Amino acid sequence: MNIEAVLMDWTSQLAAAGVESPRLEAEIFYAEAAKVRRGSWMPDAEADPAVTAQVMEWLPRRLKREPLQYILGTAPFRDLDLFVTPDVLIPRPETELLVDWVLKHLPQGGRFLDVGTGSGCIPLSVAYERPDAEVTAVDISPAALAVAKKNAEKYHLPVTFLESDLLSNVTGSYDVISANLPYVTDEEYAALEPELFFEPRLALTAPEKGMALVLRLVKEAPARLAPGGRIIWEVGDWQAPGLAEVLRTAGYADVTILQDYCKVQRFVAAGISQQQT
């Protein structure tokens, strides 16, 4: 069979399984197996038997809706290509906007802390783009930290990793803190796309309408923010206004709700005054 016929067959199978972008994923599979750039082949060229054999090992997993990134073992994020396993969430494009915010507010030579780091996508991007910064990342999951450390080693980035339940093992103060913590409710979880059930539920759901860990960090963060420091959370759309009100009541300053690419209220940022401790 030529490459186009093979791609059409895989596309048909992926579409029947409900995959959102079946042709794109068929091409990604072929490119990854062939170790070439996607679309660099001649459609009427004969398909490489070794390539098709590799894809036929991957395809049944994707037909069961296992995420493409777990099958291939990598996920792109900003300028990095990160290792991912089912021990960590797959980095989302909207989280790149959180990194933009961190880079904007982190002073030269500043100290940055990422809470609930998962694959390490946030702190590693900051360390990669701001080598002047001192970057620390924490997670409660040893398995997630192992993935994050592997990614740091891949790019030779000097990020400090700590196993910690939020800030329980964190010392010192930071100019900027970010947190992409679990915020999905149990009710929302039951209605998620099939791919999400392959991701670690520990990193997705939380009690108290998804806000338990977020609200804990609201209380813990001032002790670890330097005077004038800032913090940002990634949350669900409907949660953002409530979190903003909690922050104002708790004495945070400059509370701001920020939108993602789809105009969803995705982030809540706040500051701490020079006098506040």
Image (cartoon, helix red, strand yellow):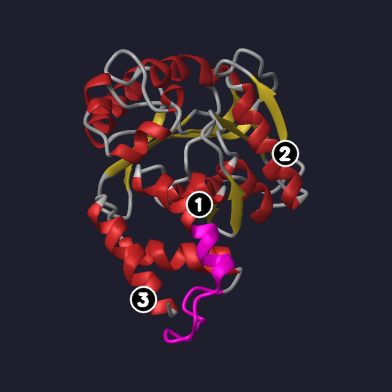
Q: Position of residue 103 (x, y in %)?
A: 56, 50
> Residue 198 or 132: which is nearer the viewer?
198
| Residue 57 numbered tag | 1
Q: Earlier in the sequence, mark 2 or mark 3?
A: 3
Residue at position x 40%, y 22% from top? Answer: 214
- Give me the C-alpha separation between circle 2 and circle 1: 35 Å
User: Quadrant location of the N terminus?
Assistant: bottom left
Q: Which callout, 2 or 1, points at the residue further toward the start of the chain?
A: 1
Q: Secondary structure at mark 3?
A: helix
Bin the neighbour count of mark 2 within 10 Å (Cα to Cα): few under 14, some 14-19, many 20 and up.
Answer: many
Could you tell me the amino acid type at mark 3? Ala
Q: Is residue 71 left or right of residue 139?
A: left
Q: Give the CA separation, mark 2 to mark 3.
A: 46 Å
- The image shows residue 264, relative to residue 11, as above or below, that is above
Q: Nearer the viewer, residue 195 or 145?
A: 195
User: How many marks on residues?
Assistant: 3
Residue located at (27% from left, 39% from top) = 193
Magenta range: 37-55
Residue wearing tag 3:
5
Alpha carbon distance from label 1 to label 3: 18 Å
Number of the front mark, 2 or 1: 1
